[in-house]
Amino acid sequence: MATLDISIVNSSLPTIQGEIGASGTEGTWIATGYLVAEIVIIPLCGWLERLLGLRTFLLLVAALFTGFSVLCGLSTSLTMMVIGRVGQGLTGGAMIPTAQTIIATRLPRHQQPVGTAMFGATAILGPVIGPVIGGWLTENLSWHYAFFLNVPICLALMALLWIGLPHRKPQMDQLAKADWLGIVGLAAFLGGLTIVLEEGEREQWFESRHILWLTALSLAGFLAMMAGQFTARQPVIRLRILLDRQFGSVVIMGTMVGMVIYGTSYVIPQFLAYIANYNAQQAGGVVVLSGIPSLMLMPLVPLLIRYIDIRLAVAFGLVLLGGSAYMDTFLTAQSTGPEFLYSQLIRGVGTIFAMLYLNQAAIQSVPSEYASDAAGLFNAARNLGGSLALAGIAAVQDQRMWLHNRRLEETLNANSTGLHDYLAAQAQAVGGTEQALRALSGTIQMQALSMTYIDLFWILSMGVICTLPLVYFLRPLDKHAPLATH
């Protein structure tokens, strides 16, 4: 549910905006609100789990997730919807690392590879199949069911949590010992930074007072979080583990992988919608292709981790991710969904090799008592990579679109006989010179847009290649350690 709800509204967004009276810019908060809240809560899960106990914490977030899902489904205004989505992000984000904790602590060691594979399949497929399910529900039933779908699943989940997990008394003394400076600082830093990245391009960056205040909030949060590292007896999350050569490298590579996963899943539907005139359901069907290799390889995860060296596997995964993005640089304005078939399948294989090994490396890079901190930082870095990708795409898209438009227009010489002959033929075909000029302008726009998307794929591919040298800092995995599920 948590991974599915990240993207389930993406294909339904235009319909939802129309019904709740939100503009295009305002409507982006329906998606952004969830991601911001999730990034804030994931690093705090270790502390909240210690405070409340695993079962109590999960029962609470599952119940709240249900309530916020219903609020989203009943929303009649943008305010209601954003509150519901932020609530979903806070509670859904808390389910991801805690679900992994169940696998690590409740399953016998010989069953953990099976648990890892099952969890990995849901974690990777959730964001991929979200647009497909959301698009189908919107077109065949109503967008409301994209949220009401969570209610029966949540009720079943709560029953299983009540039966399957032991109760532990809350450790309320953790409240007195808590690193409140770090907690508040972490929330302000990650929340403010994510919103600045998501909204910066639309708000013209630092020309907007709104962005300036959020940047100041993020900076103050960072300073407070750093102060907590030195003053608290037990910091809410130990940032010093980032100084470990392997873990720091893993976080950078995980951020880059997050940029590719989220970036391509955003750019491909945009390309298909604007260039190939695909609807939401058709575009979602192309995006879901990358989930097929993930699902097929997941049962082999224990064998892959046991027999393939981490440096070789991560390098192989990164090369596939970079190569799949590079394959998409050969698209044209005539490209359609089938053109993405091979790149999407290769991207799915690359995601498995890169993410699963980096997951293992993140946990094994630090002492076992810091495992929850490592998991929180790694998951937050991956999601932050998604925000960085979306912010970068928005900035680059506007600039490159303008540049390609101007460059194409410069090639059209007003005295060119070829151009005059083309316009004359077009005028005869479409019924007038004005219509012919309008058609030519549309052709230029289409070509400039396709070239812009090609630039975005090229940047993503080069970004992945730039992180390849960090593979050198990875150490071989402990073959006898239990599989990490974070």
Image (spheres, grey):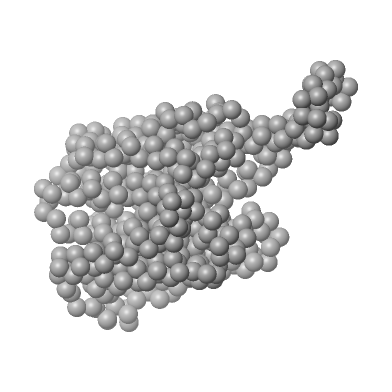
Q: Residue furthest right?
A: 415
- Please determine whether, in this image, residue 446 is positioned above or below residue 225: above
- Please determine whether, in this image, residue 439 is positioned above or below residue 260: above
User: The N terminus appears in which quarter of the rendering?
Assistant: bottom left
Front residue of 41 and 309: 41
Residue drawn at 25 percent across, 40 percent down: 298
Front residue of 204 and 62: 62
- Residue 134 in view, yes or no: no
Image label count:
0
Q: Quadrant of residue 49?
A: bottom left
- Residue 394 in view, yes or no: yes
Front residue of 350 and 307: 350
Residue drawn at 24 percent across, 73 percent down: 56
Instruction: Give the side of residue 131 with respect to residue 375, left or right.
Output: right
Residue 224 in picture, x, y percent from top left: 48, 70
Residue 66 in picture, x, y percent from top left: 34, 68
Instruction: Give the side of residue 439 with respect to residue 384, left or right.
Output: right
Residue drawn at 64 percent across, 37 percent down: 449
Residue 368 in picture, x, y percent from top left: 23, 57
Q: Quadrant of residue 249?
A: top left
Front residue of 475 and 80: 80
Residue 222 in picture, x, y percent from top left: 50, 65
Residue drawn at 85 percent across, 17 percent down: 417
Instruction: Give the side of residue 415 with respect to residue 446, left or right.
Output: right
